[in-house]
Image (cartoon, coloured by chain):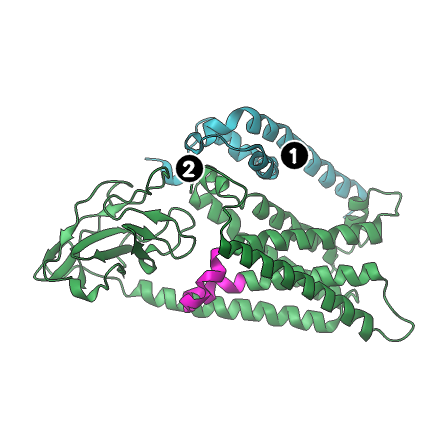
Amino acid sequence: MNEAMAGAIWLGLGVYLGAGLLAGLGVILFGLKRLAPEAGRIPWRVRLVILPGLAALWPVVLARLAGVRPAEDRP
Amino acid sequence: MAAGYSIVGWNGFKRVYDGMLALGLSLFVLAHFGAGLLSAPAGQHPSEIQLLIRATGAAAFSLLTIILCIGPLARLSPRVLPVLYNRRHLGVACFFTALVHAGLVVLWYHGFSEMNAIISLLTSNPRYASFGGFPFESLGVLALLILFVMAATSHDFWNHVLGPRLWKWIHMSVYAAYGLLVAHVMLGAVQGETGLAQAALAGGSALLVTGLHVVAGRLEWARDRTTDLPPEGEDWLDAGPAEAIPNGRAVILVPPAGERIAVFREGAKIYAVANACRHQGGPLGEGRILDGCIVCPWHGFQYRPEDGCSPPPFTEKIPTYRTRVTGGRVFVEPVPQPPGTPMAPSMAGEAG
């Protein structure tokens, strides 16, 4: 692996996680009620624990917010 | 369960479990550090940072080996179930230990470079086309990323949002991480970065994990092969005599198609529900009925046997099945009803 390729991987990972962090912040501020309506009030410390996962899996979470349900919940 | 979320649903058992985990991990790192210090030839002492890098790496690898052994061991002996109960804390501890190891490596070997430390890590050994010379550090980075995703999604919130199937799929990637780490340790030894003894231990650990999975897998496979077929002229499966089902316990049926079915007896009442827990697929039929609820042996999730619903305020649901008792024998229609469908129990008059 040369320096350019390693730089591209590092940049790609940074952009993905950075976008995920922004999306995750949006979700923990405004989207958790839609993701887990039955959960009641989610404490802030739990929201912070969830944030790294949101940064990593934000495309799936955004799909859930857009109405795509887990496989086992589909009719 | 999904009624409310806290960081950890603490109880006495989890406190003891985590206390022992912290103690064990600390003692392991200290012992490894001390052994490294004492065993080095005079005048060739590695630095304290290098010893700590090796100790945390060995601790993370050993912890992951233990984590992977717990699953098959719990299939072989129910006495291991208490260790399985809080396994995710082991996983999170493993990730943080590996993160300390990786952080020290980056700081010590690449932190003083003018180049970005991660780019330096990925390019310091360019022999990606070589087998024996392959940069083992990259394998460690990949494994660490997998462990990060697993630790970051270990909270029950993620099981709920992703759905058990996707959640399980993501967490099965632990095997890929383990394979990468075995290669990481072995290549490290080939390239003189770690000792041969560590490589031998890594190989032995991989064999142990593989062996346990093969043994447990063979048992499950044998069980699945002995499908429960309906008696001739019957569409329903025969679960045997009602009195043969221990009170508060279940027998597990393997239908020709679909998921396993857990057939419970509570006094004279017979119920049938899906065997897989909605949480992490734990075998409900190996649990018991306590206070009117089926309790999963893995993490204590509860379901009412009459409708497959978790008691309020929880919201999990599993499929139920029709049952009947004829001539003292229990029969189950192998057609799952939608999760949460109420199903009146059959009465086994003679069972008590």
The disc at residue A27 is: none
User: With respect to residue B66, does B125 lie above or below?
Assistant: above
Q: Position of residue B329 (x, y in %)?
A: 13, 62
Q: What's the magenta region?
A: B68-85
**Total numbered labels:** 2
Disc 2 on helix, strand or loop?
Answer: loop
Q: Amino acid at mark 1?
A: Tyr
Disc 1 on helix, strand or loop?
Answer: helix
Q: Amino acid at mark 2?
A: Ala
Q: Is residue B83 magenta?
A: yes
In which quadrant is the C terminus of chain B drawn? bottom left
Q: Relative to B20, is B156 on the left or the right?
A: left
Label 1: few (<14), some or many (≥20) within 10 Å? Answer: some
Q: Is residue B20 magenta?
A: no
Chain letter for cyan?
A
Marks 2 and 1 share the same chain: no
Residue pointed to by mark 2: B3
Spatial CA distance of label 2 from label 1 is 31 Å
Q: Position of residue A7 (x, y in %)?
A: 77, 40
Residue pointed to by mark 1: A16
Q: Chain of mark 1?
A: A
Q: Between B229 and A48, which is closer to the camera in this rendering? A: A48
Chain letter for green?
B
Residue appearing at x 46%, y 27% in the figure:
A34
* Residue B76 in view of the camera: yes
Single out the residue that lies furthest toward the right. Answer: B43
User: With respect to residue B152, does B55 lie above or below?
Assistant: below
* Disc 2 versus disc 1: nearer the observer: 2
